Amino acid sequence: MNLIRFTFFAVFLLVVSFFTSSLVLADAKSDYDYQYSQYRTGYSEFVILKQDYLNTSSLDNQQKAMLSAKQTILARDLAKASLNWYLMDRIASYNVDYNPIKPVITSLDTARQYFLGQAQKSQSIITQEDLKKFTQGYLTTITENDSLIKFGIVVNKIAALVRIQTDSAIALDAIIPKLSTPIPSALAARIQELKDSSEIIDGKIDLLANNLNLADAIAESVNEIFFTSRVEKLVEIRELQLDWINRLIDIDINYVQPQI
Amino acid sequence: MSNPKFKITNPEAIKLLNDIKSGAFLVPVKDWITRFKWFLVSGLVLAVLLIALAIGNAISRRNKPPVFLPPDLGTPVSTTGNAVKSDYEWIRQNIQDLSTDLPDPVIPPFDNSIDLESDNI
């Protein structure tokens, strides 16, 4: 009897965890949207209060501007942390095990922890001098952490391409045993072409991923062509993948699927 | 049996008979025709034209030109109903749905220099 109860409880937990995991995936985006909207609201208020203080340097205006600055810094760093989390979540959703992008994912998490730490640290600001020191310290470390977001954005696309490559390879492996034997030489040649093309695409993805030089992240990220140069590569790989899957589907329709 | 013989005694009737015999009766008619001859000619021409149009119309209705139509090709029948679908269409769809735009998501602007000194707002 106890065993049955335990089994029911385990199944219940499994179902609950399944639904809550999907909610967590949805949360990454909604959390980022919420945090960024908080920052936008806070920043527009801060700009007005700072201007008031610069126009009239009263103690009251200073306190109002200080409080607003603290709130805005908190919202800013939480928004950045959420953006990193959102990117990590999207990359994880592709469920790929691809070594070249792992250092970037780790760095994204490190940067997220840094932003969360800065958000917490900002709440110890009391005086205007504290605020000045905080911002000066922030500016010395922020460039590298900000630059990682750009790397995360590219890695997100690479993970999508790798997922497609994995699915395509699984599809080809599933089709081959379904072909009637002996496989005609023309068809065998087409399958070999698919395998060769797949290796070429893999090589192009590897090249794109290995060109993400984390050691020189700051210099790379400020480069104006950081994204544009990679867009060209993404487009090229995507076109090759589309051509590949078209050829596979043609084989599937003509040699595997029952003809009506 | 007597043969009765009529004798016109009414002077107006006698005058009318005399006018008819002498042709004097037609004089006012001739005068009227002479006076309105152009109206009469115009009316006659118009009447001839209208009659000609009516006749032409009636003839054209009787002799309609033959209509040439293309042969009936029948109703086109759709051939998409029996199309064979691959099990891997979803991979193609995933590739087509993959956006190559960068940056995606767009990096929003953040102010990293929040302080109360600088006038950079």
Image: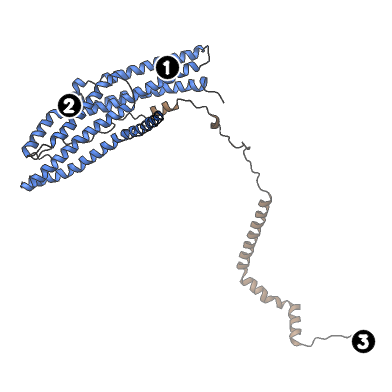
Chain colours: A blue, B brown
Please identify the quadrant where the C terminus of chain B is shown.
Answer: top left
For the residue pair A125 and B76, the one nearer the viewer reads as: A125
Q: Which residue is drawn at 67% across and 73% down?
A: B30
Q: How many residues crowd mark 1 within 10 Å: few (<14), some (14–19), many (20+)?
A: some
Instruction: Please give the residue where the numbered disc 1 appears in the rendered image.
Output: A194
Q: What residue type is labelled 1?
A: Leu
Q: Do the residues labelled 3 and 1 touch (CB within 8 Å)?
A: no
- For the residues beneath circles 1 and 2, the answer to whether they share a chain is yes
Q: In this view, does A189 lie to the left or right of A140?
A: right
Q: Which of marks 1 and 2 is nearer the N terminus?
A: 2
Placement of B74 over or under A219, stated as above or below: below
Between the residue at mark 3 and the residue at mark 2, the CA separation in whole angstroms equals 157 Å
Which residue lies under the disc numbered 3? Answer: B2
Q: At which x and y percent is residue A176? A: 47, 16
Question: For residue A32, which numbered disc appears in the image?
Answer: none
The chain under label 3 reads B
* Chain letter, disc 1 residue: A
